[in-house]
Image: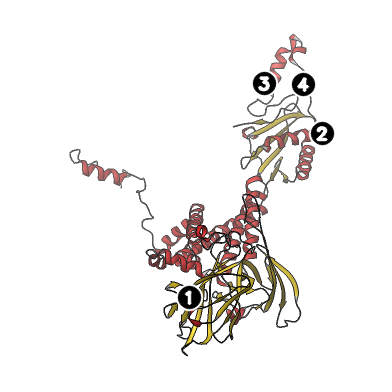
Amino acid sequence: MSDTKTSPQPADAADPDAADIDVERLSTAPEDSDAPVGMGILGWGRWFWRQLTSMRVALLLLFLLSLAAIPGSLVPQEGPDTMKLVAWKEAHKGITPLFEKLQVFHVYSSVWFSAIYILLFVSLAGCIVPRTWQFIGVLRAQPPAAPRNLTRMPVYAAWHSDADPDAVHAAAHALLKKRGFRAVVGNGSVAAEKGYLREVGNLLFHFSLFALLIGVAWAGVASGSASKLVLEGQGYSNTTTQIDDFYGSRFYGVNDLDKFGFKLDGFTARYQESGPQTGTARQFTANVRYWTGDDATKLKKSTIEVNHPLEIGGSKVYLIGHGYAPVVTVRNAKKEIVYRGPTPFLPIDANMTSRGVVKVNDYGTDADGNKTQLAFQGFFLPTAPENFNVTGPRSMFPAAADPMLVINAYAGDLRTDSGLPQNVYQLDDKAMTQLKVDGNIAKVRLKVGQEWELPDNYGTISFDGYQQWATFTISHHPGNSVALVGAVAAILGLVGSLFVQRRRIWVRAVTGADGRTLVEVAGLGRSESARTAEELAELAVELQGDAPAVEEPSDDDADDDADDDADDADDDAPTAADSPAAAAPTAPETKE
């Protein structure tokens, strides 16, 4: 059998396409492809896992998560502030249906936001686990042995000494341990390494980011919030019947509410009275007495301020707003009191101009004997203007310096018995008739203590004063503490990974042909470290205490007859390329 191997014959030069096919068949270069070729399901799964757990994809997912959270900050979300969401939808009717399909009004529980969140979660987990095992292996391993040629290291120093090599190694080992290095003696040298906290910081950052995601996810599935408007002198119990609005989650419902309550004894509001910031709020303080459990007799005093909530059990009570409630008394034609009390009006501007409706459901019958109901709609002005023709019904200052009630009246059916839900702050006037005087709309401006006699013999309404109210949000977010700790730990880990420098140092002492000990010190920074050369110089200076450098005779003092012997001695000594020995230790040389 012949050992001769035949090779493919080249294609006919007249057929360029055939030549190209032969070239491709002979080539060993891999085919260009955007994705793995010739792999089964398992291969594709491995490829996808490698891509998902790569740093590039993790950063991309983190960036996408930041972008996905932007709509949640710009568009009102379904939650405690329902009125703001309704107002936004009314102002943007054209785009509202599209936003509802895209789940923009509940971004953080949407399918697309959850998908990015879960992928980032899996990516971090797939990155942390192998890096942790790898770092554990590094901690258990000894520092790497000294390279054969230390002169190639970026930082290097050497000198001759009469000290014993073993004594030099022992002294170097002790000095490196004193400086916090992990040092080991072996193979005629000392190997040391420092800066493991850099990788610890890196892992801490990843673990903290992982914990941050867990905290946010936990808060998303086990959190809830409720809102309540409380008048001065009234109380609140954290039960379903007293909550204005409640927003729970999968693992937190109305049956999980903490048992507590509080009474609003008073509300203090202070504003800037002069200067360019006139009217700016300076103090909002709600003075409360609260209780825990079912015993409402044991009260504790406390205050609730903006960004300083009252923490009771696993819930926090936040102060989120305040306003005024004008106190009015309504009498019918028989002078019987049919309504008396405060009615909260909602602020519509920074000067606390407030709009509201007083609904009188039990008015009785009108002058003709027909069952009827009354309503008064208008504005409460804490500080009324002097000239309404210029400003209109607008308050001039948020504090109640000169309060006034500006209202008009309606009579008819409030449709409260229709079974349809109504907003207590808005008037359904479809079955109401606005009262008029001489064909003009009946309206009045009342100061405290004044009374208005209604047209058509509907009785009177008097403005008796005002009370303040405050709105509170009762929030239960169990994952917030975990997220906060994760965020702080992530910052600490990032600082450690950026500022802790990992570096290695080797010390080798060997006896040369002249009987002297050549001491070599070299360093290598595993990252950009400006301290490597400085640290090596300090070590060399300290090490000279145990291995002092020796001086060699100068060539100028040698006899002319000894030139040949000196040349022979120079030939036997180590060359500068291998070990640049000197009479005195050379300064550490930093190489690019």
Crowding near the residue tagged with mark 4, few <14, some 14–19, many ≥20 C-alpha atoms within 10 Å: few
Which structural element holds mark 2?
Answer: loop
Q: CA distance from mark 2 to mark 4?
A: 19 Å
Identified at 65% across, 61% down, the residue is 485
Crowding near the residue tagged with mark 1, few <14, some 14–19, many ≥20 C-alpha atoms within 10 Å: some
Where in the figure is residue 341, as x and y percent of width and height?
61, 78
Q: Are marks 3 and 1 in contact (CB under 8 Å)?
A: no
In the image, what residue type sits under mark 2? Gly
Res. 427 mark: 1
N-term mark: 2 or 4: 2
Crowding near the residue tagged with mark 2, few <14, some 14–19, many ≥20 C-alpha atoms within 10 Å: few
**Residue on which the image places disc 2:** 545
Q: Residue furthest left?
A: 14
Res. 571 mark: 3
Colour mapping used in the image: secondary structure
N-term mark: 3 or 1: 1
Label 4 vs label 1, nearer the camera: 1
Identified at 78% across, 39% down, the residue is 166
